[in-house]
Image (cartoon, grey):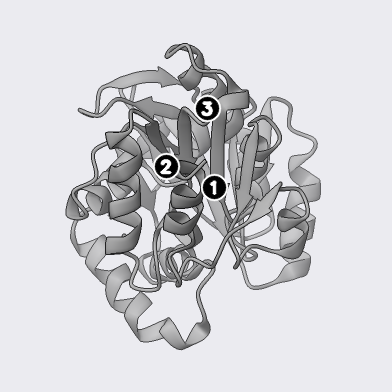
Amino acid sequence: MIKCIAIDMDGTLLGINHAVSEENRNAIQAAQAQGIEVVVATGRSYQEAIYVLEDAKIKCPIICANGAEIRSVDGTVQLTNNLPIETTKKVIEVFEEHQAYFELYTNKGTYSNDYDKALTVIMDIFMSGSSKQDYEVSLKAAKERFESGLVHLVDSFDTLLNDAIVTINKFIMFSFDNQLLLNVKEALTQIEGIAVSSSGKENIEVNSLDAQKGIALTNFVAKRNISMEDTMAIGDNYNDLSMFKRVGHSVAMGNAPEDIKQQCQKVTDTNVLHGVSKAILAALEK
């Protein structure tokens, strides 16, 4: 019996308009009405995630930044797994040596030192699982997100590293250059204590080794006396694998890469065709 459902956001819960569809919202609320715990498990920061969920009138806990934070329904931080400063500096050195563009996700929001490239990164996140014909829609949403203060500009990342109240949750690096992505991944293997994944084919995400969705979800359900065997995870990309490998019910989106689908028990419809709602409703019928 499924007692908890963990749902990824981009390319999964969100459609091509980067919002939660009525179908998906209704299915989530139907699950909650039956006493099933629903948690969003996303690579986004809390600020980016709650911005969308509040608009959809969805209230649930959130696993943020691939597991760097677990937040309660009211936004209270319940668990953190941040990157140590020394490790953070080593990752920055790798990115800078390869002249790779990256952003920092922190407890105070997401930071960039280049506005134009920041838009490109955000669009990649929004367009994960969507077709390239959605470019204009994605650009508009990316600018709105930036202008809403969900991404902040700094002249230097040293400003954040020297701030005692700022903690580093995650890095995201972006490139269309496949060879550069491979080179950076190889260089990152020399750094201990980090988890390297991706939420799209054109990015690399770096977290603390303990900040993975699967680990965070294991902790989340344990505190609610729910087993992972009774938990379902729905997602579309490589940063969802740690959940898929641990839960009793793994569901890949129809828009997920083929090797992701092969590692899941079931495949639902695409994010455009409300695959999340179909997976949830199918589970409720059992």
Alpha-carbon span between mark 1 and mark 3: 12 Å
Going from N to C along the chain, the mark reached first, 2 or 3, is 2
**Element type at mark 1:** strand
Instruction: Name the kind of residue labelled 3 in the image.
Output: Leu
Q: CA distance from mark 1 to mark 2?
A: 23 Å
Q: Amino acid at mark 2?
A: Tyr
Name the image quarter holding residue 246.
Answer: top right
Residue at x 55%, y 66% (from the top left corner): 269
Q: Position of residue 79 (x, y in %)?
A: 41, 18
- Distance, label 2 to label 3, CA atoms, is 20 Å
Q: Residue at x 18, y 58 (%)?
A: 148
Estimate how packed mark 3 is, as few (under 14), some (14 to 19) or many (20 or more) residues with alpha carbons within 10 Å: many
Nearer the observer: mark 2 or 3; the answer is 3
**Residue for badge 2:** 105
Report the disc number at residue 234. 1
**Front residue of 78 and 146:** 78
User: Is the residue 233 above or below the residue 164 in the image?
Assistant: below
- Mark 3 lies on residue: 217
Q: Secondary structure at mark 2?
A: strand
Front residue of 211/176: it is: 211
Query: Residue 256 occupies which quadrant of the picture?
Result: bottom right
